[in-house]
Image (spheres, rainbow, N blue to C red):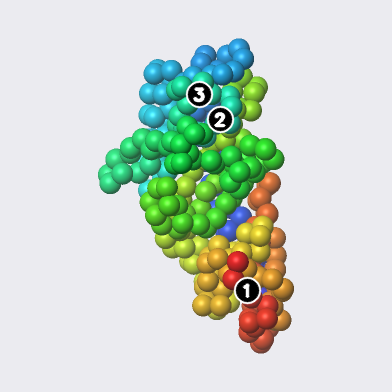
Amino acid sequence: MTDSSVRGVVQKLSAWADGLFADLEELERTLSTHLTADFAGEPPFEVGRTARAGLGAAVSGFLSAHPGFDGAGLIFKLDLLEPSTARLEWWITDGDGVARRDFILDRSSDRFYDYEYLEWFEGGFNAGSRTLAGPYIDHLGVDDYILTLTVPCHVNDRKVGVAGMDILMNDVEAQLLRMLAPLGHGAALLSRHNQVLVGNSGELSTGVRIAVMPPGYSRVPLDVSGVDLSLLYHDGESSVGKSSVGES
């Protein structure tokens, strides 16, 4: 394995991840401008009809420009919203079009969507940083493996929630396997939890957690601002052993 091959793969993976977050941050800036009037003053806030129409148009354009994305929009800190009209501003791809996705936000309901403890909201809102969560099965949406990316959303200099997007893992795998190919068998992109996002061998399948660095392998961090991702690759003769790789 040559150093130039590793550097080349790291650069491609870093550009891929950084590009996704840059697109999401641009979407956040666009969406937040539609809320400046409705989110003036003090909470609770309510998204008006005009603002919602603008949000929907912006997200529709965003999803149309990114065919592999399953959904996108804004998720608010629930206590900031007027309880009687609280909604998440989220849209999903639906065939050749885009459809609004509604969630139950009534805390008294047994179907209440208690999202504020989830990693993508904790990181994006509480930590105020770029956050990548998953892969996980989206039981509330497509019932398929997805990645969720979020960034903080600010309106009138107040942090109000997160802007997010869901990406189907099938699309992620198709892109990343091509990027990993120059390193041969035994390469993977790891999350901050040391879990495999995408790997090109059976031992490094999606979701496997790397508990200990396997013999014959090296790890290199990606150059992505605010996100802890790394490349694992085979640089020796040893193979990944069962004692080094465990399911999450």
Quadrant holding the N terminus: bottom right
Q: Mark 3 highlights which residue?
A: 83
| Vertical side of 55 occupied by 241: above or below | below
Q: Does residue 48 appear in the picture of this structure?
A: yes
How far apart marks 1 and 3 lie (CA) works out to 43 Å
Q: Residue at x 31, y 44 (%)?
A: 94
Q: Does residue 184 appear in the picture of this structure?
A: no
The residue closer to the viewer here, 16 or 145, is 145
Label for residue 78?
2
Q: Residue at x 59, y 50 (%)?
A: 132
The part of the image, by quadrant, that contains residue 159 is top right
Q: Mark 1 highlights which residue?
A: 246
Question: Is residue 179 shown left or right of residue 122?
Answer: left
Label 2 SS: helix
Label 1 SS: strand
Amino acid at circle 2? Leu
